[in-house]
Image (spheres, rainbow, N blue to C red):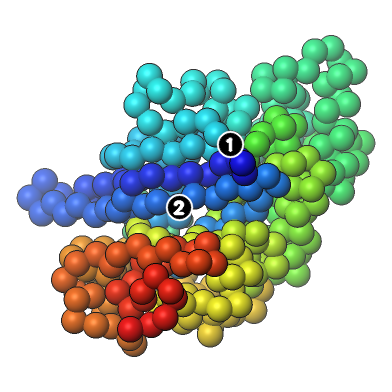
């Protein structure tokens, strides 16, 4: 039986927005589900444009925020569920490690970067003794193409963004996690270096047997490294499946739109920081969140949530257009 890499059930996160007098609620995640099972470590890409709920999912997994409902398993362990059922915070850190978007924010500018590596080796890896700790640091740095001698004793501002992101990856792998959650890890890295960094994920997957949740709005990088793909739109999964299956024959109208407009590596579809009116409106639609933009919409799309259709090729698609055989209506 293949193992559960990630399994998400009915996971939701509701935020309240606005002032006391004009409150709105949005479901940044509106009851999503997907399941990745494999005997091999897997790179799962979570793809969606800005404001689709990606960071919300990452924050839930790291327990930076609490879900409004639902559950999640990683490597067969319950990480989101009732407090009694789920694993402890300490065990979560050994299971899942993060890599953040901006490496300069992830490191305190007044601390030498090897402090972080050492802390992870001691507190999470439980390395004991000077030699074992240094060995763990050396190995992890080597895995990301850096030398311990070039890193030890230096401060964040002595590195480029790309180098510092490599150091964050090294820090994460010292913990030997089952899963690394990387939220837009290359969007602040120089465009010419992005592929080098995402390719590192592949080598770490193979060498360390670590799975990844690679969160991105950048379909081009996801294209090269994904084993499995989940596409989000306004807090809902629209299509999820094996990367080759989805990329070679996208079925959901939104996935098709994305693939027809694959930008060059690193280019953004949208870089809006603030939530636009359209975004709020789409989040609050009764039916399919994509229906106002969808070239193939049917009357029912506006009225209710699209059904989940499971196809023979293993993918799930949320769309009124499809029947179980993958044929469009
Ligand atoms: N703390 C918060 N309070 C209110 N709304 C939030 C909060 N965090 C995120 N949101 C909203 O939830 C939606 C999803 O945000 P986010 O998860 O950051 O998306 P993404 O990472 O895909 O850009 C957005 O509309 C965003 O404005
Ligand atoms: Mg985000």
Percent position of residue 213, x then y: 58, 50
Q: Is residue 74 left or right of residue 130?
A: left
Name the residue: 73% across, 37% down.
173
* Residue 227 in sight in this render: yes
The disc placed on residue 157 is none
Report the residue marked by disc 1: 75
* Residue 99 in sight in this render: no
Which of disc 2 and disc 1 is earlier in sequence?
Answer: 2
As drawn, the residue found furthest toward the bottom would be 295
Percent position of residue 224, x then y: 70, 67
Query: Label 1's element?
Result: loop
Name the residue: 69% across, 37% down.
172
Percent position of residue 114, x then y: 77, 31
Residue 181 location, quadrant: top right
Report the residue marked by disc 2: 34
Camera-side residue of 119 and 220: 220
């Amino acid at each position: 039986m293949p193992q559960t890499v990630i399994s998400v059930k009915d996971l939701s996160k509701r935020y309240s927005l606005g002032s006391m007098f004009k409150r709105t609620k949005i479901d940044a995640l509106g009851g999503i589900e997907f399941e990745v099972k494999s005997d091999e470590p897997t790179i799962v890409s979570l793809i969606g444009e800005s404001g689709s709920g990606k960071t919300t999912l990452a924050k839930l997994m790291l327990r930076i925020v609490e879900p409004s409902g639902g559950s999640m398993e990683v490597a067969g362990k319950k990480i989101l569920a009732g407090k009694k059922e789920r694993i402890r915070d300490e065990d979560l850190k050994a299971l899942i490690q993060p890599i953040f978007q901006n490496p300069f924010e992830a490191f305190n500018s007044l601390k030498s970067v090897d402090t972080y590596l050492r802390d992870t080796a001691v507190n999470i890896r439980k390395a004991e003794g000077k030699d074992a700790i240094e060995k763990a640091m050396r190995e992890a740095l080597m895995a990301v193409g850096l030398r311990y001698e070039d890193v030890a004793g230096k401060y964040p501002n002595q590195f480029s963004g790309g180098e510092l992101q490599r150091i964050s990856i090294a820090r994460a792998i010292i913990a030997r996690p089952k899963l690394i959650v990387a939220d837009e890890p290359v969007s602040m890295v120089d465009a010419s270096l992005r592929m080098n960094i995402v390719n590192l994920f592949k080598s770490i997957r193979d060498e360390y047997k670590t799975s990844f949740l690679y969160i991105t709005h950048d379909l081009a990088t996801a294209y090269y490294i994904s084993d499995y793909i989940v596409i989000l739109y306004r807090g809902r999964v629209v299509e999820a499946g094996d990367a080759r299956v989805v990329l070679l024959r996208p079925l959901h109208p939104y996935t098709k739109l994305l693939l027809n407009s694959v930008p060059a590596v690193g280019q953004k579809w949208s870089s809006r920081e603030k939530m636009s009116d359209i975004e709020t409106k789409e989040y609050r639609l009764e039916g399919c969140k994509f229906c106002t933009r969808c070239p193939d919409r049917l009357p029912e799309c506006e009225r209710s949530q699209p059904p989940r259709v499971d196809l023979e090729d293993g993918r799930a698609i949320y769309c009124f257009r499809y029947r179980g055989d993958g044929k469009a209506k």
